[in-house]
Amino acid sequence: MQVVLLEDVKSLGKKGEVVKVNDGYARNFIFPKKLGVEATSANLAKLKQQKAYEAKVAAEQLAEAKALAESLAGKKLEMKAKVGEGGRLFGAIASKEIAQEVQKQIGLTVDKKKIVLPEPIKTLGTHEVSIRVHKDVTAKLTVNVTEE
């Protein structure tokens, strides 16, 4: 029996795939748990339409991410911090503070989880920060840390 999977099923397939399974497995496991539906022409057409819609939404999200990355590219953030001996900061500048400063200075909302810092900024000077706007799009931002 041909089945269109509505959810990922371990050792069988991913969501949206058409797989061949035994009749009993489909009737007793897949259908009652709503993991899949029978692969009729109507269900296949519905699947095709859903995939087209998902592709359209993904393309729109990618376009928005590219626009946001362009607006962030080449921008500089000025941040002030208290400094101790040797130019080391008291505490550190983490992704949360960078996200707040992007909101204040540039006017764009960036999720702190999307800011990629290998480690928090602990020294004065200019630092390059990556912002993962989308899984395929990354923007670079320059953060200049000065003494308060």
Image (tube, rainbow, N blue to C red):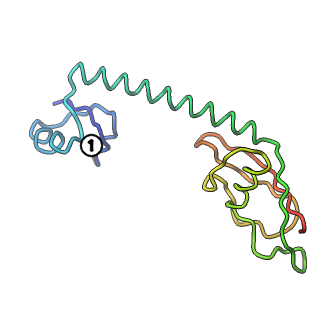
Residue 20 relative to residue 65: left or right: left
The spot of residue 23 in percent (x, y) is 10, 36
The residue shown at (15%, 31%) is 1
Label tally: 1
Q: Is residue 51 above or below residue 113?
A: above
What residue does disc 1 label? 12
In the depicted view, which residue is nearer to us: 1 or 129? 129
The residue drawn where x is 70% and y is 64% is: 94
Amino acid carrying label 1: it is Leu
| Looking at the image, residue 132 lies above or below residue 21 | below
Q: SS of the residue at dot 1?
A: loop
Residue 36 position within the rendered picture, expressed as x and y whole percent measured from the top left = 23, 37
Q: Residue at x 28, y 23 (%)?
A: 44
Quarter of the image for the C terminus: give it: bottom right
Residue extending farthest bottom: 85
Give coordinates of residue 63: x percent, y percent. Answer: 62, 30
**Res 68 quadrant in image:** top right
Q: Nearer the viewer, residue 83 or 87?
A: 83
- Horizontal side of 24 relative to 104 (left or right) equals left
Locate residue 30, reporting x and y percent. 18, 42
Few, some or many residues within 10 Å of mark 1 (<14, 14–19, 20+): few
Question: Which residue corresponds to the image point at 70% horizontal and 66% vertical from the top-left?
Answer: 119
